Amino acid sequence: MLVENNVALQPMNTFGIAARAQRLVRLRSVDDLLGLMASPDWRQPSAEHPVFVLGGGSNLVLTGDLKALVLKVEIAGRRLVEETDKGWLVEAGGGEGWHDFVHWTLEQGWPGLENMALIPGTVGAAPVQNIGAYGVELQDRFHSLDAMDLETGRVFSLDAAQCGFGYRDSVFKHAPSDERSFGLKGRALITRVRFWLPKPWKPVLGYLDLERKMDETGIRQPDARQIFDWVVAIRRAKLPDPAVIGNAGSFFKNPTVTPEQCADIIARDPKVVHYPMDDGSIKLAAGWLIDACGWKGKTMGHAGVYDKQALVLVNKGDAEHPCTGGEVMTLAKAIQTSVYERFGIRLEPEPVVI
């Protein structure tokens, strides 16, 4: 366990926002966490003694220095738990990089996560956001996870139903509303996550970008590694590399509307990008809505809208004039106002704002 004071968080968040943590603890094992909680300096998380769990910092907007005790999850490890004639059960430590883990599973011959290639962040943060891309969400492959209750020190496990997964949502993003409700926001630290990869493997190809790749290449029956390569290429063409241009990936959730609402929008804007959902609702492409409002490539202060994908906000600052979280949120709110005034749609940010 490594404890640091007055730590620069700029290299620990992919947006590259300049901020500092008064105190940061690097956790590389469950024993580190148990040791921290047994130390005399530990205070149970509360309004007076806040705690913030930090993974890869890829879904985060910092609006100032953090007075909370920052727990940086660096728990490593990847393994095959079990293989049967129905599938593979694989596990990774919460500090493992998500993309590296996906690549590793394919290298071992265990397909199923390829559509979620190149999503930034860590394995431990993935269930919090219920990450997803190109027709597959984490909940589709999730088996269970291990976590520690930061209030009691109790180690516990959750299955998919207990995680309360929704679109970019989970029980880890909600505080309990009363003593009977089950919310784990600010309370649980995820240490290990397990995934069930079923046999026989079946490709998920229903997304337009993947269909275009099949048309371009003439490959009508791609294997998992081919889909992985396609997804990596598509994401790199659309999304900026955080190592080059600071960003937090897709900044807004794709909103869902009723068929009647969608028909009303189509009547005014026939080119609106939309996808029917299994529950009868319609998902709209937030990036298209933002682009239609003229925001692509625009800048406010040192925050901007990426010129290749309007769904992504980027850091336009430099070492002398770094982008601030306040500038990012000012831009985000201006975009939300524009979209609401034109389409009557309220966009919700994906990143955690703190």
Image (tube, rainbow, N blue to C red):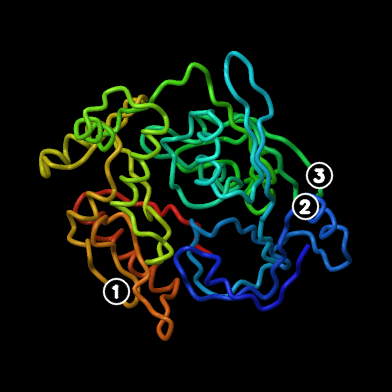
Distance between the alpha carbons at the discs numbered 2 and 3: 8 Å
Residue placed most toward the observer, 59 or 113 = 113
- Residue 32 coordinates in the image, percent (x, y): 80, 56
- Residue 351 coordinates in the image, percent (x, y): 46, 56
Q: Nearer the viewer, mark 2 or mark 3?
A: 3
Placement of the N terminus among the 4 image quadrants: bottom right
Q: Which of marks 1 and 2 is in front?
A: 1
**329 horizontally vs 111: left or right:** left
Distance between the alpha carbons at the discs numbered 3 and 1: 45 Å
Q: Of the two numbered discs 1 and 2 on the same chain, state the one appearing first in sequence.
A: 2
Q: Residue at x 40, y 62 (%)?
A: 247
Residue placed most toward the observer, 243 or 353 = 243
Q: Could you classify mark 1 by the number of other residues whose Cα lies within 10 Å: few (under 14), some (14-19), or many (20 or more)?
A: some
**36 horizontally vs 203: left or right:** right
| Displayed quadrant of residue 38 | bottom right
Residue type (three-letter) at the residue carrying disc 2:
Glu
- Residue 241 coordinates in the image, percent (x, y): 38, 59
Q: Mark 1 points at which residue?
A: 300
Q: Name the residue under label 2.
A: 151
Residue placed most toward the observer, 143 or 352 = 143
Q: Residue at x 48, y 42 (%)?
A: 131
Under circle 2, the secondary element is loop
Q: Name the residue under label 3.
A: 154
The residue sitting at the top extreme is 85
Q: Of the two numbered discs 3 and 1 on the same chain, state the one appearing first in sequence.
A: 3
